[in-house]
Amino acid sequence: MGLVDDLAVGALMRVEVDGRPLCLARTSDGAIHAFDGLCTHEQTDLTEGELIGHEIECPQHGSRFDVRTGEATELPAEIPVHVYPVIVRAGGLYVDVSDHG
Amino acid sequence: MSYDVRIAPEVVRVSRMADCLEVLRSDKVRDATPEREHTLRGGTLVTLDGAAHQRRRRLANRLVRREAHRRYRDDTLAPTVARRLAEARRTADADGIVRADLVSFGREVFLELAAVLGGIDLAGDDDRATLASLLETIHSGGNLAWLADDDTEGVREAVARGLAAHQTFRHRFYEPSLAARRELIQRSESGAISEDELPMSYLMLVALHADPAWEDEDLAVRDLERFLLGGAHTNVHPLGFVVDELEAWFVAHPEDEPLRVDAGFLDGAVNEVLRLHTATPVLLRRAAVAMALSSGLEIVAGQTIAVDAGAASRDETVYGSDASVFDPRRQVPTGAYRYGLAFSSGPHMCMGLPIVLGAQGIDGTQVHLLRALYESGLRRDPSHVARRMPANRDRYDSYPVLLDPARRMSPGTPVIA
């Protein structure tokens, strides 16, 4: 996906895997999370949203998801986003999408 | 249906939930506000389309975030409800029973909340009454789009009255409240207060020049009026229907009666009422280009589309064969709106949804108010008839209730975090 240093704390990054948009987020504890890049409510690009603590806020209606678990934590979204394991190796960033197609 | 909306024959009507969602979420549709209402609604968040809408909506979304909601609930809603209840109790008859009007009570509470979110300073009851009256007149003049025969003297007069109220609102409320916020910003810039101490509101966003479009001050005034109307008016609508539906429910399910102060049960009731008694039963859009829905329905460019939110919210393919029946324990399919199209969908989905319904341990405005009233012994006043609005039979204009000490209940399940 790139280098860990490419993603600052609080930042979001859009990446594509096999045409599927993913969102990478780096929370204040330094952890990097990967999840589906589209809001489950109306398919808005979450990368344009805002990271608030451990939640990503959808820019359109303010739905939120916990970036650690994918759980929808604020209406109107109710369906979770899929989260993917992130592996950091030698400063490089890898996302394991094998469990989701 | 329980409402009567006249729709011009050239308008295409969609009533299945799938069709309605497709239209409301499509980037091929635009606002359909008629020309005559542009002076009251033109350019506002509720009528804007495309990138300009997206920018302003993102600004406004910040006002209804959970963190801000908690503050509104603790600093405004809860104290306002408590104060209004205390005032009402002082009017009790010798038998201890308070006679009140649920619609008036709701209007007072929600107007105060809307004013805080909007950034309008209210000095007392006179200010509240004046603001309520102005908003009512502005609403009447700028929400006539569903009328098919629009070029009548009555409609023209309603728009003219709305415009006069708009000017009065601007001078009496908007300008002094804006000046107060500009002064706060100056104090923040000089270091007298920190930026965090600026009380965020719609008008504070205007004062901060957050959207360059607000340099057109008349637009900023219109925008704020729409924001206040959304918070103060629409919120009142469900209250009477919740009491109606629950009184009937408790007759059939007496074992549930203690649950009238249970936040989870009330939340289910509120969602059902929002679904069954949609405040805005028809949403109008205009096709910017020719479009064909997945169902095969073809819509020509320029055609007005009436999205029948009331019918879609009772769509049996979504809500089951008992879709038209009130059931506070209803389970809906994953992803379906429990509240039907009460908040619309797509770019113009109501931004107040999280405030109304609550989330993550913060009770929504409806549940908060209803629970406080039920704890105070709320029941329908059997000796006075509730009155519906003449222009919309699915809205209450007056709903007499009693706060009966014999029916008081201890506080319900706490939701407050």
Image: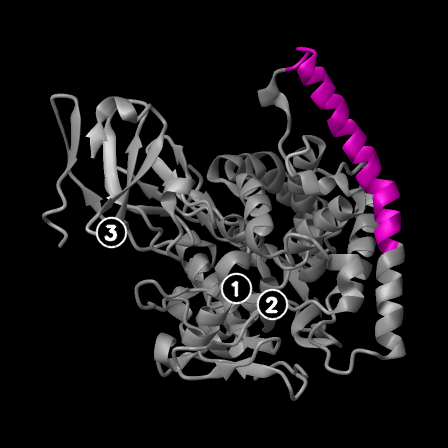
Mark 1, residue position: B344
Q: Which residue type carries mark 2? A: Ala
Q: Residue at x 83, y 37 (%)?
A: B175
Distance from disc 3 to disc 2, alpha carbons, whole Å, reads: 38 Å
Give whichever of B172, A29 is nearer the camera: A29
Classify B211 as above or below B345. above
Magenta residues: mostly which secondary structure? helix
Q: Which residue type carries mark 3? A: Arg
**Residue B152 location (% of width, % of height):** 86, 79
Helix, strand or loop status at disc 2 = loop
Chain under callout 3: A
Chain under callout 2: B
Q: Which residues are magenta?
A: B165-193
Distance from disc 1 to disc 2, alpha carbons, whole Å, reads: 10 Å
Classify A25 as above or below B159. above
Give whichever of B180, B50 is nearer the camera: B50
Mark 3, residue position: A20
Q: Which residue type carries mark 1? A: Ser
| B119 relative position to A18: left or right | right
Between discs 1 and 2, the one toward the N terminus: 2
Chain under callout 1: B
**Residue B141 location (% of width, % of height):** 80, 65
Within 10 Å of the Cα at label 1, are there few (<14), some (14-19), or many (20+) other Cα atoms? many
Q: Residue at x 64, y 25 (%)?
A: B198
Within 10 Å of the Cα at label 3, are there few (<14), some (14-19), or many (20+) other Cα atoms? few
Q: Which mark is residue B279?
A: 2
